[in-house]
């Protein structure tokens, strides 16, 4: 397996579903620590309307501040519509993530549009972002099943992938929004995208709703995925779907990789430290394992 890249999405996917709005200064502290821990990409927030989602109301401000600093990780932002893209371009987001849902119901609830219309619109925006000199990643949400509809046909998922590839968009995230994925399915889908476009940069975004998260992540890596999206402490969910749990925990994945001799460049102690602070902030235990147990080698407990 080639070394996998890790895209930390906790500041966006994790914090967007929390009742408590994290003050900007505190968020900055968490993001800075994550962005200097050796992780490859950190998602700072999403460009939604602040009155609709107060947890993400400071995304522009965060990028303005962080953009003046220098951090190891590439910073990403999630864009959902044209207005959001305008804002992302204005504040200089270097890596822009966009996506359409393979579930008709999820798509309509999330965007008010059909999957087909949403896909077309996402492609236009992604190409605009690329023309503006930004790195882009396009995703298929609810790619492995939907909390509203149940199973989503593989053909439907791949038709979105093909539309992205035909537009020249080869950085593609397969997102398990509801957590329905199982390892064989993930392995098959990742391989299929790579068969359609050898060299495509495939990302897996897996939620751990039914406990299959880490197994599915491993299947994605074995099948040739380039990166995995994870969340500190396993925070997360989707406000527009049913029974979603958090993503696979970043520090759990890093710990597992390091046990296999990979990504030893990442500062696991720093990740565990952030998750402990986040857990204290929310005043509850988070789903992640390693921040509670400490790593097997015991080093970060010193
Ligand atoms: Zn998610």
Image: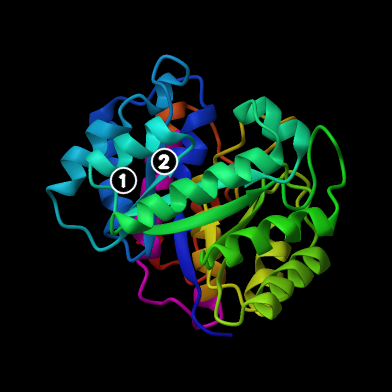
Rendered image quadrant of residue 221: bottom right
Q: Nearer the viewer, residue 93 or 187?
A: 93
Which residue range is magenta in the image? 258-279
On the picture, is 213 further left or further right than 227? right
Picture quarter with the N terminus: bottom right
| Total numbered circles | 2
Choose the circle earlier in sequence order: 1 or 2. 2
Circles 1, 2 touching at the beta carbon (< 8 Å): yes
Quadrant of the image containing the C terminus: bottom left
Identify residue for label 2.
11
Query: 188 or 274, which is in the foreground?
Result: 188
Report whether 180 appears left or right of 286: right
Q: Residue at x 32, y 33 (%)?
A: 59
The answer to if 174 sits in the magenta stretch is no
Name the residue rendered at 51%, 40% in the picture. 13
- Report x, y in % for residue 194: 65, 77
Visible residue check, residue 74: yes
Task: Return the x and y of residue 90 as percentages of the image width and height.
Answer: 23, 39
In the drawing, what numbered circle is on residue 31?
1
- The one nearer the camera, 257 or 228, is 228
Query: Seen in the image, is 234 located left or right of residue 23?
Result: right
Q: Quadrant of residue 104?
A: top right
Colour style of the rendered protein structure? rainbow
Can you give x and y, in whole percent of width and height, for residue 222 in the image? 67, 79
Return the x and y of residue 181 as percentages of the image width and height: 77, 55
Q: Predominant secondary structure in magenta? A: helix
């Amino acid at each position: 397996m080639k070394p996998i890249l890790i895209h930390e999405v906790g500041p966006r996917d994790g914090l967007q579903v929390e009742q408590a709005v994290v003050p900007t200064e505190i968020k900055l502290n968490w993001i800075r620590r994550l962005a200097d821990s050796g992780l490859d990409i950190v998602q700072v927030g999403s460009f939604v309307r602040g009155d609709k989602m107060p947890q993400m109301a400071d995304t522009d401000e965060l990028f303005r501040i962080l953009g003046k600093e220098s951090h190891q990780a590439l910073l990403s932002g999630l864009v959902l519509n044209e207005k959001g893209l305008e804002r992302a371009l204005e504040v200089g987001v270097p890596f822009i993530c966009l996506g359409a849902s393979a579930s008709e119901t999820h798509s309509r609830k999330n965007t008010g549009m059909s999957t087909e219309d949403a896909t077309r619109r996402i492609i236009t925006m992604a190409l605009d972002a690329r023309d503006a000199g930004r790195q882009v990643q396009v995703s298929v949400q609810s790619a492995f099943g939907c909390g509203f509809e149940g199973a989503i046909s593989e053909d439907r998922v791949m038709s979105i992938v093909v539309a992205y590839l035909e537009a020249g968009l080869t950085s593609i995230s397969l997102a398990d929004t509801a957590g329905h994925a199982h390892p064989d399915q993930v392995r098959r889908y990742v391989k299929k995208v790579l068969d359609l476009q050898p060299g495509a940069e495939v990302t897996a975004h897996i939620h751990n709703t039914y406990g299959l998260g880490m197994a599915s992540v491993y299947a994605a890596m074995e099948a040739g995925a380039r990166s995995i999206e994870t969340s500190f402490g396993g925070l997360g969910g989707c406000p527009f779907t049913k029974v979603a749990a958090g993503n696979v925990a970043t520090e759990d994945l890093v710990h597992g990789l390091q046990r296999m001799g990979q990504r030893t460049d990442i500062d696991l102690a720093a990740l565990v430290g952030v998750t402990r602070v986040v857990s204290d902030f929310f005043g509850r235990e988070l789903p992640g394992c390693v921040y509670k147990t400490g790593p097997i080698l015991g080093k970060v407990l010193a």
